[in-house]
Image (tube, helix red, strand yellow):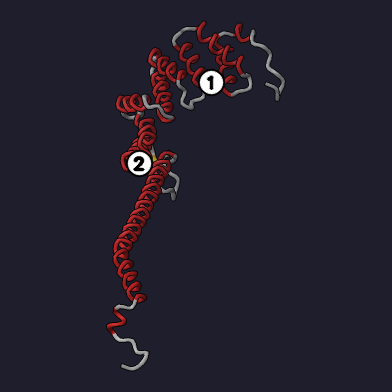
């Protein structure tokens, strides 16, 4: 054997080679679970991106569904229709418009309940009142029980419906519930409707007191302006007892 030549037998038992082989084996043993972890992380990331895309796509579709319903809601009513008008958003009768708007809002609520559910049903019911009032009132009654902004809007619409159809005790009851929990309905507007309901019930003194209190609170508000007009007609003597209005710019 030539001097300095390393045999295969010696190489196999070389300490450095032994450590190398041990390290290579250690890496090989652990590379498989590492690759598995990487694959799992990649799969989770891919699923996350897919879920995000689906959510964003659904949110966009839900918004477009409501936008379409609003286009019907804002459509013109004219007979005959103006020349060249898009007939998808123009109607010859109010009844036709209310039915189409109801269908559009119902569809938006039904197709995307997590986005448009309660609010879409509320808007649909406000149109349904014109052609199927009992069902619309039932929907508003159901929604009014929700502890939400839409719940407050539904209760206000229901109270106004009762008031408009002469069911004054029911209207007053709903307004009082709303007064206790306005849910973003302006309190002064609720008070004005209570006063008007009392007036329509023939409770002149109570209505006069309600108008007077509302006007005295803030003479500059638009609600107070309406209340002053009603009080002046209902009880002119009481209107004369109101404190003078503050100068412009001073409350």
Which comes sooner in the sequence, label 2 or label 1?
2
Q: Nearer the viewer, residue 235 or 50?
A: 50
Q: Nearer the viewer, residue 88 or 168?
A: 168
The quarter of the displayed image where residue 208 is located: top right
Q: Can residue 146 be seen from the camera position used here?
A: yes
How many residues crowd mark 1 within 10 Å: few (<14), some (14–19), many (20+)? some
Q: Give how far across and how far down residue 128 sits, in percent.
A: 34, 31
Residue 208 against residue 40 in the figure, above or below: above
Q: Can residue 90 be seen from the camera position used here?
A: no
Q: Give how far across and how far down residue 127 sits, in percent.
A: 37, 32
Residue at point 49%, 20% (across, down):
190
- The answer to whether 120 appears left or right of 209 in the picture is left
The residue sitting at the right extreme is 247
> Which of the numbered marks, if any, corresponds to residue 108?
2
> Which of the numbered marks, if any, corresponds to residue 188?
1
- The answer to whether 188 appears left or right of 57 in the picture is right
């Amino acid at each position: 054997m030539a001097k300095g030549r390393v045999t295969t037998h010696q190489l196999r038992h070389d300490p450095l080679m032994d450590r190398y082989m041990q390290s290579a084996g250690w890496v090989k043993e652990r590379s498989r679970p590492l690759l598995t972890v990487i694959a799992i992380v990649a799969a989770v990331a891919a699923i996350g991106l897919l879920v995000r895309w689906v959510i964003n796509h659904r949110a966009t579709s839900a918004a477009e569904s409501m936008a379409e319903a609003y286009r019907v809601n804002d459509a013109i009513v004219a007979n005959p229709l103006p020349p060249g008008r898009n007939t998808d958003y123009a109607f010859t009768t109010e009844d036709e418009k209310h039915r189409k708007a109801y269908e559009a809002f119902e569809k938006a609520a039904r197709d995307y309940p997590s986005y448009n559910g309660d609010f879409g049903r509320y808007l649909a019911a406000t149109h349904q009142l014109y052609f199927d009032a009992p069902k619309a009132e039932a929907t508003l009654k159901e929604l009014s029980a929700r502890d939400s902004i839409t719940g407050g809007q539904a209760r206000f619409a229901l109270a106004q419906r009762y008031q408009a159809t002469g069911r004054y005790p029911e209207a007053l009851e709903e307004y009082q519930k709303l007064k206790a929990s306005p849910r973003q309905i302006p309190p002064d507007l609720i008070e004005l409707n209570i006063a008007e309901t009392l007036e329509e019930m023939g409770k002149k003194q109570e209505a006069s007191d309600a108008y007077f209190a509302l006007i005295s609170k803030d003479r500059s508000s638009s609600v107070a302006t309406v209340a002053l007009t009603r009080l002046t007609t209902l009880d002119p003597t009481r209107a004369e007892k109101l404190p003078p209005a503050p100068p412009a710019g001073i409350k």
